[in-house]
Image (cartoon, rainbow, N blue to C red):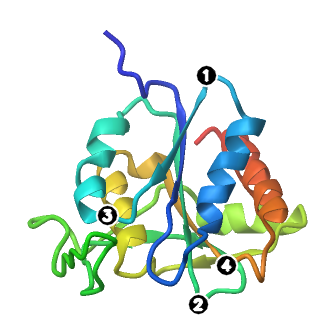
Amino acid sequence: MSNESDKKVIVTGFGSFGNVQSNPTEKLINSLKDELAEELYQFFVLPVSYNHCNSWSEQNISSSTQLVIHFGVSAKSQIIQLEKRGHNITGCSPDIEGVADSGKIVEGLPGTIETGIDTARLRKELNANGFPCEVSENAGDYLCNYIYFKSLIIVPEKVLFVHVPPEEFLSIEKLKEFSLELIRTLKSQEV
């Protein structure tokens, strides 16, 4: 019996949290749903909740999932960042439910897991096609890093996390154009 996530491209964003009352990644997911409304894609807007995200990856990703792209907003950034690795750590900032899950994400696993996607090559191709971005080695210590690390455990060769700047630096329309190019580029590389 085939798993529902078989052969799917999974794309996620996050809902509102803290000072981010209107998350650009939630708007992106809703915009991409309209553009890529076909069976190959699954879209999720994840609540900024450790309880929700704790088993999300295990429930939605399988070894035969084609590609997973997580999007999250970084208030500190003015450019799109392709995250190279997830870290096995959480900070002390509470989520939308008031939960602060500081410590290791999963005991007994390495301190970092690197994506199998060639982020340097991807950055070069995207930049050459007019989509500025950079590679980052620190996905933070909040839910962005949490969901990334949990997903990397399952299929590290097929998972990427992308931090996007606030809308004041990048419009939803430009973010959507970037995202479509990112998906096209990754699929052409047969990730």
For marks 4 and 1 on the same chain, the one whose residue lies earlier in the sequence: 1
Identify the secondary structure beneath mark 1: loop
Instruction: Determine whether label 4 and label 1 are within 8 Å by CB.
Output: no
Q: Kindly report the distance in space between the C-alpha atoms of the residues bearing marks 2 and 3.
A: 21 Å
Q: Nearer the viewer, mark 1 or mark 3?
A: 3
Residue type at tag 4: Pro
User: Residue 27 occupies which quadrant of the picture?
Assistant: bottom right
Q: Which residue is mark 2?
A: 76
Residue type at tag 3: Ser
Q: Residue at x 27, y 85 (%)?
A: 91
Residue type at tag 2: Lys
Q: Residues within 10 Å of mark 1 (few under 14, many from 20)?
A: few
Q: Residues within 10 Å of mark 2 (few under 14, many from 20)?
A: few
Q: Kindly report the distance in space between the C-alpha atoms of the residues bearing marks 4 and 1.
A: 29 Å
Where does residue 120 sit, x and y in percent of width and height?
65, 69
Residue type at tag 1: Glu
Where does residue 44 sit, x and y in percent of width and height?
50, 45
Identify the secondary structure beneath mark 3: loop
Say left or right for 50 vs 162.
left
Where does residue 172 sit, x and y in percent of width and height?
77, 63
Q: Which residue is mark 1?
A: 39
For marks 2 and 1 on the same chain, the one whose residue lies earlier in the sequence: 1
Say left or right for 185 vs 56.
right
